[in-house]
């Protein structure tokens, strides 16, 4: 029986070393029934860290050929705060086409969905799932799992930052009851209009609560705030 996303997030929370995240990546691959799950970190100085289910041969080849310089997933996602389907990226360059051809030969998969995350001091990371589904099947998969994948991506990055040598974890900041209510409604998939109606407040007031919670959590956007609040146990869904 496959572990649930919540169970895997609990496993991630208990990780005490970066190496422990490898088992989490493998569990996520099985849970989402995809070819690969990968977390790839690049620091401001260019240092790389990764965990995931790509073959050792492909990882070594990627590093040996310095594909970081031509990988459109890295460059194409850098300026985005939203999930990126690989089909949206520019694969037209000669070097890029060769990179794509080789990646497929090494079993990476023809489909990919990457979620960019960021941290302090220029840290940049991608959480990626890949597979060989058809375009139609892949679109259905991404739509059905988008929310869960975003939450997992930010949880992976939070844990990687926590385990980074010499770094102290961010303090847990309490949210007010109304901030908890607002973030919980969004975590349940309600629109802002639905959340405002449920809480019997205006959408403007709701936005104030959400922005206040986002600021307390140090989140980049609302989705990131939901992920952080869930990861830190400030809301329960």
Image (cartoon, helix red, strand yellow):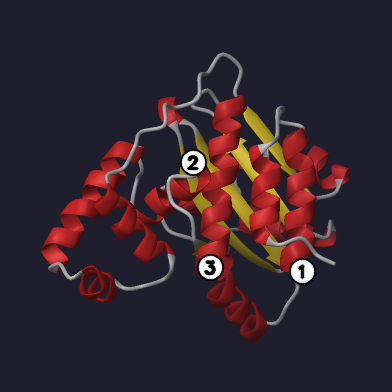
Residue holding disc 1: 33
Q: Marks 2 and 3: which is nearer the front?
A: 2
The residue tagged with tag 1: helix, strand or loop? loop
Q: Secondary structure at mark 2?
A: loop
The relative height of residue 22 versus residue 137 in the rendered view (above or below) is: above
Residue behind mark 3: 146
* Left or right for 12, reference 118: right
- Looking at the picture, how far across and down is residue 35, in whole percent? 79, 64
Residue underneath mark 2: 232
Please report whichever mark, 1 or 2, sits nearer to the chain's N-terminal start: 1
Instruction: Estimate the spatial distance between the alpha carbons at disc 2 and disc 3, rounded to whole Å.
Output: 21 Å
Residue 81 visible: no
Q: Nearer the viewer, mark 1 or mark 2?
A: 2
Residue 83 screen position, x and y as percent: 48, 61
Quarter-wise, where is residue 3 in the image?
Answer: bottom right
Q: CA distance from mark 3 to mark 1?
A: 14 Å
Q: Could you tell whether 125 is left or right of 216 in the image?
A: right
Real-space CA distance between mark 1 and mark 2, rounded to the nearest whole angstrom? 27 Å
Sequence-first disc among 2 and 3: 3
Res 152 visible: yes
* Picture layout, residue 194 above or below residue 90: below
């Amino acid at each position: 029986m496959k572990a649930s996303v919540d169970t895997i997030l609990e496993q991630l929370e208990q990780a005490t070393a970066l190496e422990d995240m490898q088992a989490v990546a493998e569990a996520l691959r099985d849970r989402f029934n995809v070819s690969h799950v990968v977390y790839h970190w690049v620091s401001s100085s260019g240092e790389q860290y990764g965990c995931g289910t790509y073959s050792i041969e492909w990882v070594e080849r990627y590093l040996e050929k310095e594909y970081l310089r031509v990988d459109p997933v890295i460059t194409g996602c850098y300026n985005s705060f939203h999930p990126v389907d690989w089909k949206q990226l520019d694969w037209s360059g000669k070097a890029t086409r060769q990179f794509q051809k080789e990646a497929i030969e090494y079993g990476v998969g023809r489909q990919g969905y990457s979620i960019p995350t960021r941290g302090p001091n220029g840290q940049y990371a991608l959480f990626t799932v890949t597979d060989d589904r058809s375009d139609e099947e892949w679109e259905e998969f991404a739509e059905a799992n988008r929310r869960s994948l975003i939450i997992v991506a930010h949880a992976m990055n939070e844990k990687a930052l926590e385990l980074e040598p010499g770094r102290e974890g961010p303090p847990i900041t309490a949210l007010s009851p109304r901030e908890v209510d607002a973030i919980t409604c969004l975590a349940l998939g309600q629109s802002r209009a639905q959340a405002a109606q449920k809480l019997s407040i205006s959408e403007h007031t709701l936005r104030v609560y959400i922005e206040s919670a986002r600021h307390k959590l140090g989140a980049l956007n609302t989705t990131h705030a939901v992920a952080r609040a869930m990861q830190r146990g400030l809301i329960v869904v």
